Image (spheres, rainbow, N blue to C red):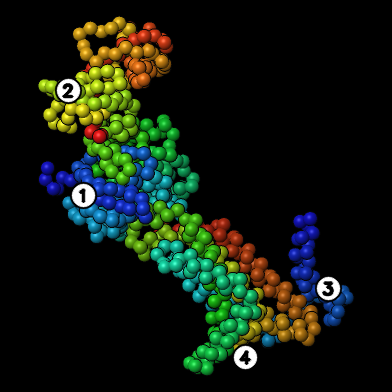
């Protein structure tokens, strides 16, 4: 049963990977093994530009969302806030709002802002802001869970031993929630990497990302180089996930140098 | 005593959590170098009091002075006080050396001095070879020592211990009790020790504050608390106690007579204790080991009553008896030193003697 389920989950991905090595240009017939399409891909300047945009978008938005989302989680966990549970509940709204609604809302917001203030010309910066908005709730929830699971007496012990609030945060809280922050940033990066809808609506000229490139190419029919590109993205995602796992296991997070 | 000899002075401390009054008008003073225990059942406010002293919680009312200085505006990290937490609260991401050095690092003590102080303290608590381990890799008893070392390496004026031995097994506990006591004598640091274990408090402390429902019921030496409890709560919380209630029938020269369910009882009543009035209700306490039992009716003494032995529990060094006199059940503990009571059995008739100097008048209404 579970084997069937796994087959159902992974068969489409396998098909994409297998067909990226198919020598036949069209259709579903097998024309022999080739790595030619990867070569074609490498020589495609549009693919390179899209890859660059995707990477910039993913890294910058993840960086911003990780910092802001983690600080928000810390603030929500440690300080008195009016209507706290309502505020925390509000965080979940962007998670269950359909992407398309979110995308249209952001597009409207940008066009209004452009009309009134002349700001937010569509392009990579608007896409980064858009990605940050849907990444923050995920980061805050993951980091918040880690904070909630932390023994509160550890921070008290730190203060008791003469550490002020900033020292306590840097030497105790931060190292202890670091695995949560790393997990959250990996999640945020993956979300950015495979986002199509929000990117599509908030992109401008010259800010095409890999998912948008794939979409526009597929409209002209599925070609083997698109399969190769997809395989490439799968490889990057898997490498990122694997790196995160290894990093979390070997993480010895030391905040004080050995004495 | 002059001001400089008090480590802690508390005056009218209050703390409320919502509708729960955790501390109600708590006032006391602790001498420098004293081993002081806060003793009481869980929820009596002893841990809350400790947290107020540490600065981890703030009082709603009242004043607190540490080493003669008002602690009101001093945050936890600036108080000359360190805590050994109940859960130890060792930093899981730091090894044992780094844990112990934490306080010195935060205060910016030079690393050479830090190193030698950490070395010295690890030797004192006998954990020299644990330095490179992480808290998850050591035992409960070792964690306790690390927590202690991490606190005292800072040379605090007052060390707060929140049930530090609570999670350890009995044998280790006895050993660490001795060590703690020895350490306190050597270092001369004031120890404030929270516990719910009355024996631990009696064995270790110079003075004990018995707490109940957010108040200090009585603050005294262990001996005073045991021999002269002032309230029913104290009498029953420390050891076991026979409690007898009655109405005052007569007040004479240094003695008073009370009509109880046993019959008329006389007890020593001194001028400095609670004032009595004829007809008023009083409560008397009598420790089981001060109640005498004999088969023959003793002559020449008062407060003798006849009863039936209900239960005999042989405990090696001593034997516990339960004796019913009318509707009152009395507990007696007698040493097995060859005296005649050893031949008493369940169902036997026996006489009990409640010596008038052993009856303690309680202040409860």
Point out the frontmost of discs 3 and 4: 4
Point out the frontmost of discs 1 and 2: 2
Viewer-closest of A201 and B255? B255
Q: Which residue is mark 3?
A: A33
Disc 3 to disc 4: CB gap under 8 Å: no
List x then y, in percent, for residue A84: 45, 66
Q: The residue marked by circle 1 belongs to what chain? A: B
Disc 1 to disc 2: CB gap under 8 Å: no
* Residue neighbourhood size for the residue with mark 1, other residues' Cα within 10 Å, grouped as few (<14), some (14–19), many (≥20): some
Q: The residue marked by circle 2 belongs to what chain? A: B
Label 3 and label 1: CA atoms lie apart by 87 Å
Point out the frontmost of discs 3 and 2: 2
Q: Which residue is mark 4?
A: A205
Q: Is residue A218 left or right of residue A94?
A: right
Residue drawn 36% across and 9% down?
Answer: B349
Query: How many numbered discs sit on the rendered protein?
Result: 4
Viewer-closest of B338 and B281? B281
User: Which quadrant of the figure contains the N terminus of chain B?
Assistant: top left
Q: Is A144 above or below relative to B302?
A: below
Q: Which residue is mark 2?
A: B250
Label 4 and label 2: CA atoms lie apart by 106 Å
Label 3 and label 4: CA atoms lie apart by 37 Å
List x then y, in percent, for residue A147: 48, 60
Which disc is residue B11 wearing?
A: 1
List x then y, in percent, for residue B83: 33, 48
Residue drawn 25% across and 34% down?
Answer: B364
Same chain for labels 3 and 2? Say yes or no. Answer: no
Q: Is residue A43 left or right of residue A147?
A: right
């Amino acid at each position: 049963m579970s084997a069937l389920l796994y087959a159902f989950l992974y068969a489409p991905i396998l098909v994409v990977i297998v067909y990226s090595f198919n020598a036949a240009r069209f259709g579903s017939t097998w024309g022999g093994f080739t790595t030619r399409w990867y070569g074609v891909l490498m020589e495609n300047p549009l693919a390179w530009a899209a890859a660059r945009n995707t990477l910039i978008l993913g890294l910058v938005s993840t960086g911003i969302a990780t910092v802001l989302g983690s600080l928000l989680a810390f603030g929500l966990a440690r300080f008195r806030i009016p209507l706290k549970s309502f505020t925390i509940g509000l965080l979940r709204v962007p998670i269950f709002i359909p992407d398309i609604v979110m995308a249209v809302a952001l597009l409207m917001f940008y066009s209004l802002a452009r009309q009134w203030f002349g700001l937010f010309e569509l392009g990579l910066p608007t896409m980064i802001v858009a990605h940050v908005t849907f990444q923050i709730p995920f980061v805050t929830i993951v980091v918040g869970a880690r904070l909630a699971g932390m023994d509160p007496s550890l921070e008290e012990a730190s203060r008791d031993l003469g550490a002020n609030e900033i020292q306590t945060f840097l030497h105790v809280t931060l190292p202890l929630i670091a695995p949560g922050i790393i997990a959250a940033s990996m999640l945020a990066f993956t979300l950015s990497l495979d986002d199509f809808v929000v990117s599509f609506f908030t992109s401008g000229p010259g800010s095409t990302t890999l998912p948008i490139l794939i979409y526009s190419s597929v409209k002209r029919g599925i070609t083997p180089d698109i399969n190769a590109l997809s395989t490439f993205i799968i490889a990057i995602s898997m490498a990122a996930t694997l790196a995160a796992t290894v990093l979390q296991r070997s993480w010895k997070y030391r905040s004080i140098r050995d004495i | 005593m002059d001001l400089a000899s008090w480590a802690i002075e508390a005056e009218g401390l209050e703390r409320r959590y919502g509708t729960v009054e955790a501390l109600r008008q708590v006032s006391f003073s602790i001498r420098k170098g004293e081993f002081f225990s806060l003793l009481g059942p869980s929820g009596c406010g002893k841990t809350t009091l400790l947290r107020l002293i540490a600065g981890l919680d703030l009082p709603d009312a009242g004043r607190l002075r540490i080493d003669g200085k008002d602690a009101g505006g001093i945050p936890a990290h600036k108080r000359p006080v360190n805590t050994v937490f109940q859960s130890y609260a060792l930093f899981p991401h730091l090894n044992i050396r780094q844990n112990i050095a934490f306080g010195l690092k935060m205060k910016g003590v030079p690393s050479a001095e830090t190193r030698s102080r950490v070395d010295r303290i690890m030797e004192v608590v006998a954990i020299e070879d644990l330095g490179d381990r992480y808290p998850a890799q050591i035992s409960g008893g070792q964690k306790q020592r690390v927590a202690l070392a991490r606190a005292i390496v800072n040379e605090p004026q007052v060390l707060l211990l929140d049930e530090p031995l609570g999670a350890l097994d009995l044998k280790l506990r006895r050993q660490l009790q001795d060590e703690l006591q020895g350490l306190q004598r050597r270092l001369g640091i004031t120890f404030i020790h929270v516990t719910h274990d009355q024996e631990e408090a009696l064995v270790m402390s110079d003075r004990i504050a018995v707490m109940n429902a957010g108040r200090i019921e009585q603050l005294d030496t262990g001996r005073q608390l045991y021999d002269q409890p002032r309230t029913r709560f104290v009498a029953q919380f420390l050891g076991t106690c026979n409690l007898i209630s009655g109405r005052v029938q007569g007040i004479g020269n240094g003695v008073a007579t009370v009509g109880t369910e046993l019959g008329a009882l006389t007890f020593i009543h001194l001028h400095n204790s609670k004032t009595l009035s004829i007809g008023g209700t009083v409560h008397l306490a009598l420790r089981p080991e001060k109640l005498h039992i004999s088969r023959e009716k003793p002559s020449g003494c008062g407060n003798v009553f006849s009863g039936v032995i209900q239960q005999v529990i042989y405990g090696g060094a001593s034997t516990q008896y339960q004796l019913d006199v009318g509707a009152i059940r009395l507990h007696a503990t007698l040493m097995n030193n060859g005296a005649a009571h050893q031949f008493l059995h369940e169902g036997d008739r026996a006489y009990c003697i409640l010596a008038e100097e052993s009856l303690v008048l309680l202040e409860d209404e």
